[in-house]
């Protein structure tokens, strides 16, 4: 396992210390394991087991609830395979690259250049001989590692004498390596396709149709959740850097000049750890400020970007990440995409240090613009002007446009489109060239290729026109929060894991299968995953106190009725009827992060035999291990309330049922002897069977 970065805090060191025990628990309880493990596995691929798959699906359900439902977003589900033209237009074919360096003595040893540079800088900072001045220098290089060009990387590698880690041999010059998985489409293989490297492009391609479904109202957002694929140079660190992973992305479309958000006030007071680019370049620590202050100061570009930063923070905390280990880092100027206005990463501190888990970017209008240009499809929105606007335009005359069509036929749209994009000054310069030489050259570059056309002077007839515009047509800008679900899951596992002070029996391990290596559990620690109930894989576990309870003939009917009510409430649950002690079974459920345990004991059985409606069972809470006794008939509804976003908390429930283990009203009736008297009266009434039971009861109580 890689050493913890020197830039990490003492909190990160605590995560690193606990990580070996957590890894053992994750593997033992099959939250996830390396895919194809029985074949030796392949780096960068993981399989989620039953509890891990449940946690992941619950996290996605929470994400949809937090964003899609609460922010009234639309959702699409696009394909995993995309044709070449789409990803060529988006820039992925040419620019979706990382730099790779290889051992000059062994081409089979290679590294991602920026990550190797980061590791070298971390090692230098960890050196006891490192001076404060050197540490600042190394921090600056570390911060800019993934923003360097190939030439800059070569210079930095030479400056610090960086060699191949294993052999000490010279490294080859950094080369671009495209991260997309190519795949032919169709039996002929003539259509080039790729596994999508992100889910975002499927949203941009369907913007036009979603805008229609939104009744052309702006602003609005579109979400997509699904798999993305990247042929990582050096996949490592478990779920952190995979070749197949899950993304959840939002594209929120806004007017280019109207980026205020109506709900910004709801998050403006949030105090967050921000690491703006000036602080990074000066090797200074993060600053703490409210989002309102950050937007007002221009640190965060606009309210909509700030709103999604705030909502992202709230989601991460709600999902189980510790607030004190979350910060937002701004992209450096040379790290940011050329079309972006502002970009921030939500970084979560883990055993590996600060890890980027969410990217929140103002991508301007780049994606819609390039796809519209490549397909000649208007990807625009419209809004009425409050006051009609005069617009002066300089372009082809109608006669010239018609003549252009006859002259260039199938290429006429491409030529006219290019002329339409040019400014008045550019058109006048083109006309001057045509008048001097009798023709002018025009180069058109789009998804149809890059072609140069010769246009005769007589076809280049331009005119100035004035139009009264009642409706504004514009290409929307987009704010994009992009969530790496698997990375967030890694943070949740680390932030919720702890070891409970040992009480009673240690967790029992399943026996090894024949041929498996023996995995000793003699030293297994009683680990607890304190998942928030909304994320937990199972909401409760049903436990008979011991095997005597299981053997009672009434138990099966009681258990099945309870299972039915849990299912009706939509709750995931487990039943553990093994012969292990109750303490051992509590420990097993704590390892799985199950927040509540329903224990059926002798009292519950006796009550059920006498009157099924009066039966009560014990409900145990995982984190505090406190228990309360509740009516069996309503316990599923109570668990459902505790596991949802409702206002009921465990502390409130515990206060209502404190001390006696029963409802305070029931406790009062029992204390005053009313319960006993009522029970005796009802028994006598059943024997007597009087004609007027109410009169008979009144007379009996009057005589008391």
Image (cartoon, grey):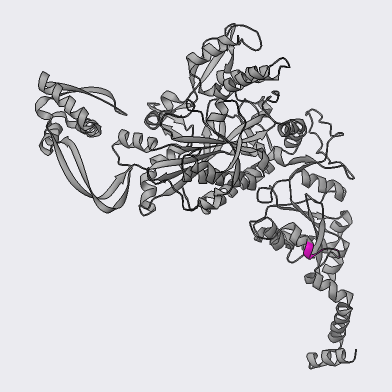
User: Between 327 and 49, which is closer to the camera in this rendering?
Assistant: 327
Query: Where's residue 492, x and y in %?
Result: 67, 40
Query: On the rendered structure, is 591 left or right of 118?
Result: right
- Secondary structure mostly seen in the magenta stretch: loop
**Compared with residue 350, is residue 318 higher up or lower down, i.e. above or below?**
below
| Image quarter in which the N terminus is found | top right
| Image quarter in which the C terminus is found | bottom right
Q: Is residue 611 visible?
A: no
Query: Where's residue 230, x and y in %?
Result: 52, 28
The residue shown at (88%, 45%) is 503
**Compared with residue 381, is residue 79 higher up or lower down, i.e. above or below?**
above
The span shown in magenta is: 655-659
**Compared with residue 477, is residue 652 higher up or lower down, i.e. above or below?**
below
Query: Where's residue 154, x and y in %?
Result: 52, 12
- Location of residue 128 (image quadrant): top right
User: Between 263 and 119, which is closer to the camera in this rendering?
Assistant: 263
Query: On the rendered structure, is 343 left or right of 1?
Result: left
The residue shown at (35%, 45%) is 208
Q: Is residue 374 magenta?
A: no
- Location of residue 520 (image quadrant): top right
User: Between 64 and 694, which is closer to the camera in this rendering?
Assistant: 64
Query: Where's residue 65, x and y in %?
Result: 56, 52
Q: Is residue 686 visible?
A: yes
Query: On the rendered structure, is 261 left or right of 672?
Result: left
Count of numbered tags: 0
Q: Is residue 658 magenta?
A: yes
- Location of residue 254 (image quadrant): top left
């Amino acid at each position: 396992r890689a050493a913890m970065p020197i830039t990490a805090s003492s909190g990160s060191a605590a995560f690193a210390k606990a990580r070996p025990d957590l890894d053992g628990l994750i593997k033992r309880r099959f939250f996830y394991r390396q895919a194809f493990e029985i074949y030796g596995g392949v780096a960068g691929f993981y399989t989620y087991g039953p509890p891990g798959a449940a946690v992941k699906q619950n996290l996605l359900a929470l994400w949809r609830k937090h964003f899609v439902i609460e922010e009234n977003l639309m959702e699409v589900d696009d394909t995993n395979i995309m044709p070449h033209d789409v990803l060529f237009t988006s820039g992925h074919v040419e620019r979706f690259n990382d730099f790779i360096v290889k051992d000059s003595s062994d081409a089979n040893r290679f590294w991602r250049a920026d990550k190797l540079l980061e590791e070298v800088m971390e090692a230098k900072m960890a050196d006891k001989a490192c001076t404060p001045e050197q540490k600042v220098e190394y921090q600056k290089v570390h911060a800019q590692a993934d923003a360097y060009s190939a030439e800059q990387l070569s210079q930095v590698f030479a400056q610090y004498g960086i060699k191949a880690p294993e052999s000490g041999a010279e490294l080859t010059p950094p080369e671009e390596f495209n991260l997309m998985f190519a795949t032919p489409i169709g039996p002929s293989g003539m259509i080039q396709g790729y596994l999508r490297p992100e889910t975002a492009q499927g949203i941009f391609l369907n913007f036009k149709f979603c805008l229609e479904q939104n009744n052309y109202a702006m602003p609005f957002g579109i979400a997509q959740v699904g798999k993305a694929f990247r042929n990582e140079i050096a996949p490592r660190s478990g779920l952190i850097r995979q070749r197949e992973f899950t993304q959840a992305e939002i594209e929120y479309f806004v007017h280019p000049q109207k980026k205020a958000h109506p709900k910004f006030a709801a998050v403006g007071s949030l105090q967050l750890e921000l690491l703006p680019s000036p602080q990074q370049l000066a090797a200074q620590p993060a600053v703490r400020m409210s989002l309102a202050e950050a937007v007002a100061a221009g640190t965060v570009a606009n309210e909509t970007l700030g709103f999604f930063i705030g909502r992202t923070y709230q989601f991460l905390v709600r999902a189980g990440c510790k607030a004190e280990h979350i910060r937002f880092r701004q992209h450096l100027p040379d790290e940011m995409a050329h079309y972006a206005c502002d970009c921030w990463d939500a970084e979560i501190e883990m055993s590996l240090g600060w890890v980027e888990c969410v990217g929140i970017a103002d991508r301007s209008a780049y994606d819609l613009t390039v796809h519209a240009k490549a397909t000649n499809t208007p990807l625009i929105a419209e809004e009425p002007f409050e006051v009609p606007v005069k617009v002066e335009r300089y372009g082809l005359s109608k006669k010239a446009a018609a003549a252009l069509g006859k002259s260039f036929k199938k290429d006429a749209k491409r030529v006219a489109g290019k002329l339409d994009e040019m400014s008045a000054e550019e058109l006048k310069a083109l006309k001057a060239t045509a008048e001097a030489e009798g023709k002018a050259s025009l180069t058109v570059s789009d998804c149809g290729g890059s072609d140069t056309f010769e246009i005769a002077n007589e076809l280049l007839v331009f005119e100035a026109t004035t139009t009264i515009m009642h409706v504004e047509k514009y290409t929307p800008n987009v704010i994009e929060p992009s969530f790496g679900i698997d990375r967030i899951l890694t943070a949740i596992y680390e932030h919720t894991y702890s070891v409970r002070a040992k009480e009673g029996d240690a967790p029992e391990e399943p026996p090894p299968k024949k041929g498996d290596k023996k995995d000793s559990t003699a030293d297994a620690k009683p680990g607890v995953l304190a998942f928030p109930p909304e994320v937990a894989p199972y909401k409760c576990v049903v436990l008979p106190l011991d095997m005597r309870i299981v053997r009672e003939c009434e138990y099966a009917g009681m258990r099945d009725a309870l299972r039915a009510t849990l299912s009706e409430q939509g709750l995931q649950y487990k039943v553990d009827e093994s012969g292990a002690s109750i303490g051992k079974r509590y420990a097993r459920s704590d390892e799985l992060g199950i927040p509540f345990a329903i224990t059926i004991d002798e009292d519950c059985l006796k009550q059920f035999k006498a009157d099924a409606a009066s039966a009560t069972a014990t409900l145990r809470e995982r984190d505090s291990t406190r228990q309360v006794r509740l009516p069996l008939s309503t316990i599923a509804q109570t668990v459902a309330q505790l596991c949802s976003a409702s206002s009921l908390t465990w502390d409130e429930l515990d206060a209502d049922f404190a001390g006696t283990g029963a409802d305070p009203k029931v406790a009062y009736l029992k204390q005053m002897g009313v319960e006993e008297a009522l029970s005796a009266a009802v028994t006598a009434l059943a024997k007597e069977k009087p004609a007027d039971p109410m009169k008979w009861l009144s007379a009996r109580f009057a005589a008391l």
